[in-house]
Every structure is written in structure tokens, then in C-alpha cells.
Image: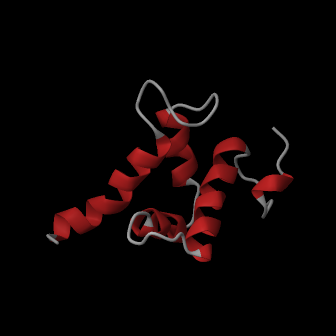
């Protein structure tokens, strides 16, 4: 894989995960909110977006990192560890 493709991979997967510009995949959250949430996340979350689609089975650490993104999307700055603990 070309170096530029490697650098863009997390963002390509992020775009697929977060939905289209006008019809996002998260209730009440558009692309800008998704970008802002991603910017609040640790580097491990970006690495998790790289890992999406690399195997048929979702690894626990990848799932946990993606949950971190979702937590930051709905509760910016939260320290809650489990998505199920959030009340929407």
C-alpha cells in the first residue's frame, strides 16, 4: 500500500462509519460533530478506524476504541467507560 493510502486509511474508514454528509448514521449528529468527537479521542481510536474491515471478526480492543468515539460523540469529555452507562 502506498504511504499516502496508509495515512488516509483511518479517515476513509471514519467517513464510512460516520455516514454521509447529509444523512449521518448517528441520531442528531452530523459530520462536524463526528469530526469534533474524533479530535477529542486518543490515538488508539484512530488506530481502531484503521483496523475496521481488516478481518471478519471485530477485536475487543477495536470495539472498545470505537465505543470511546461514540461516548465522545454523545457526551463530550465524558469519562464513562461503558456506552451502556450513558443515558441519551
Name above or below for residue 81 compared with residue 18. Answer: below
Q: Residue at x 47, y 26 (%)?
A: 23
Q: Residue furthest left?
A: 2
Q: Residue at x 44, y 64 (%)?
A: 52
**Quadrant of the image occupied by residue 56:** bottom left
Q: Position of residue 51 (x, y in %)?
A: 43, 69
| In-image side of 49 versus 6 (left or right) | right
Q: Position of residue 17 (x, y in %)?
A: 47, 48
Q: Residue furthest top?
A: 22
| In-image side of 68 versus 8 (left or right) | right
Name above or below for residue 29 compared with residue 52. Answer: above
Colour scheme employed for the rendering of this structure: secondary structure
Name above or below for residue 47 compared with residue 84. Answer: below
Q: Residue at x 41, y 33 (%)?
A: 20
Task: Give the number of marks.
Answer: 0
Q: Residue at x 62, y 74 (%)?
A: 60
- Quarter the C terminus occupies: top right
Name above or below for residue 59 compared with residue 63. Answer: below
Q: Position of residue 54 (x, y in %)?
A: 38, 70
| In-image side of 21 versus 27 (left or right) | left
Observer-nearest of 77 and 1: 1
- Quarter the N terminus occupies: bottom left
**Quadrant of the image occupied by residue 13:** bottom left
Q: Position of residue 77 (x, y in %)?
A: 72, 52
Amino acid at each position: 500500500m502506498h504511504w499516502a493510502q496508509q495515512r488516509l486509511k483511518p479517515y476513509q474508514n471514519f467517513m464510512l462509519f460516520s455516514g454521509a454528509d447529509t444523512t449521518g448514521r448517528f441520531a442528531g449528529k452530523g459530520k462536524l460533530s463526528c469530526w469534533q468527537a474524533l479530535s477529542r479521542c486518543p490515538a488508539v481510536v484512530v488506530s481502531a478506524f484503521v483496523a475496521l474491515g481488516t478481518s471478519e471478526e471485530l477485536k475487543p480492543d477495536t470495539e472498545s476504541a470505537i465505543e470511546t468515539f461514540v461516548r465522545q460523540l454523545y457526551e463530550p469529555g465524558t469519562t464513562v467507560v461503558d456506552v451502556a452507562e450513558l443515558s441519551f
